[in-house]
Image: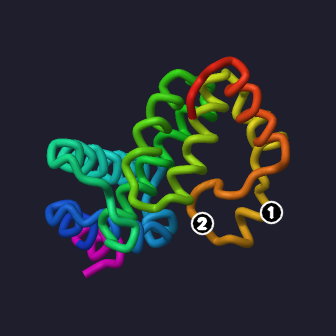
Amino acid sequence: MSKDKELKEKVLKAQQDGDIASLYVLEQQAHDTFDEETLQGFYANILDLALERLTQTLEKHRKMDTDEVQDFATLRALYEYAIEHYSAGKTQDAAALFEVLSGLSNDEKFSAALKLHWMAAQEKISFDDFLDRIADIEATQRAGTFYISEFQPEAQKLLDNLKYKGKKA
């Protein structure tokens, strides 16, 4: 069996099992093997599974546990989706997604970081300005998180400004 066909079978099995984490494990192989259109479908499947898990989580009135591999992978997929909206200039959509994500996880550091994302998008701070002025990308890379978790002092100014305006984080 060809490597391409073998990879497609692994992807199909992971999709059928609703296994987002396995799809992320196969991600590099997918990049090396699939054409752009197939790769887009690969990511669309991850997002579909993540949205399905989000719905199930909300219906059960529970928080996602970052120590549970499928919950972790789901949060990652939804975060990437929110960042995609933010970087495309869809600040309202991104803000709504960040707001949901900030309350979805049992991880306090993740929730706090997503609140800053949410506030920046809500205030219509462009994604580039968020990266340049609010986020600390080097510290985030050192922290090894899949999300922007470290921030510059400018982030505190954003928090203070919103408190001054009477908005809650």
Q: State yes or no: residue 114 in magenta.
A: no
Question: Relative to 92, is 66 on the left or the right?
Answer: left
Q: Position of residue 40 (x, y in %)?
A: 42, 46
* Residue drawn at the location 75% of the way across and 32% of the way down: 160
Q: What secondary structure prevails in the magenta region?
A: helix
* Residue drawn at the location 72% of the way across and 67% of the way down: 141
* Coloration mode: rainbow
Name the secondary structure under disc 1: helix
Q: Is residue 107 above or below residue 112?
A: below
Dot 2 amino acid type: Thr
* Residue drawn at the location 60% of the way across and 23% of the way down: 167
Instruction: Say which mark, if any, is on residue 145.
Output: 2
Q: Position of residue 46 (x, y in %)?
A: 33, 53
Q: Nearer the viewer, residue 46 or 102?
A: 102
The quarter of the picture where the C terminus appears is top right
Q: Residue furthest bottom?
A: 1
Q: Nearer the viewer, residue 27 or 112?
A: 112
Q: Which residues are magenta?
A: 1-9
Place residue 73 in its image quadrant.
Answer: bottom left
Q: State yes or no: residue 3 in magenta.
A: yes
The answer for how far apart the CA atoms under marks 2 and 1 are is 11 Å
The quarter of the picture where the N terminus appears is bottom left
Is residue 54 visible in the rendered image? The answer is yes
* Residue drawn at the location 24% of the way across and 52% of the way down: 62
Dot 1 amino acid type: Glu
Q: Is residue 58 above or below residue 146?
A: above
Question: Relative to 147, is 69 on the left or the right?
Answer: left
Q: Which residue is mark 1?
A: 138
- Neighbor class of circle 2 (other Cα within 10 Å; few <14, some 14-19, many 20+) is few
- Neighbor class of circle 1 (other Cα within 10 Å; few <14, some 14-19, many 20+) is few
